[in-house]
Amino acid sequence: MESFNESIIEYKKQMEKGIIQKAYRGIMDYVMQLRTYFLNNYPEYMVGNLYYGYMDMTYFPISVKKLKDRKLKIAIVFLHDKCQFEAWLSGSNRKVQKKYSEIISDYDWNKYRIDPKNADSIIECTLDANPDFSNTIVLTKKIEESTISFIKDIELFFSQHKK
């Protein structure tokens, strides 16, 4: 295990190359554009502010009335370590998370992943495991279609399982 100081030395070396800054800036620009895309194309959705994170994840929340009434939201997440996009069903707080995690478990709904180590998600869906940033139009369409499908599946699940 490296010491904090050794990590800083490596960090400085990598920063001097300039590639990390360029990639990070590009990711942030794209996620901001993706958020704006949802904001402009889905006026029925409540699109929240961008959370930049600590180079672990960057995300913005989306909510629809049926989920918001349950204190739930969808997070469109870019995971920096995996360099992939995911959608997470999340609650407004830990109590809400626990409640809906139990409901989903009670009905043994296994269409999407449950990661017990992730305190920020109830269920997760990979939107794009290997995003191609050279064609952001295609990437945005893929994320859009997968996100809409994820939202519809969740709404359908809760309409059929009223607990």
Image (cartoon, grey):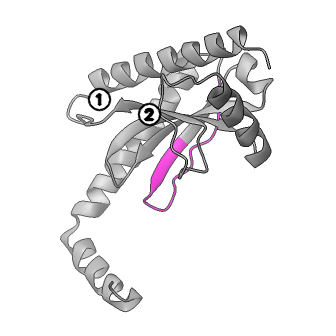
Which quarter of the rendering shows the N terminus? bottom left
- Of callouts 1 and 2, which one flags the residue occurring earlier in the amino acid sequence? 2
- Identity of the residue drawn at 70% across and 34% down: 102
63, above or below 26, in the image: above
Q: Which residues are magenta?
A: 46-59
Residue 29 image point, x, y percent = 40, 43
14, above or below 60, in the image: below
Dot 1 amino acid type: Thr
Q: Residues within 10 Å of mark 2 (few under 14, many from 20)?
A: some
Is residue 54 covered in magenta?
yes
Residue 90 tag number: none
Dot 2 amino acid type: Gln
- Left or right? Give the position of 79 relative to 15: right
- Left or right? Give the position of 29 relative to 37: left
- Mark 1 residue element: helix
Report the Cα–Cα distance between label 1 and label 2.
10 Å
Please tell me which residue lies in front, 157 or 145.
157
Tell me if I can see residue 47 in this picture: no
Tell me if I can see residue 50 in this picture: yes
Residue 71 image point, x, y percent = 77, 32
Please tell me which residue lies in front, 50 or 117.
117
Query: Which residue is tagged 2?
Result: 33
Q: Residues within 10 Å of mark 1 (few under 14, many from 20)?
A: some
Query: Which residue is tagged 1?
Result: 136
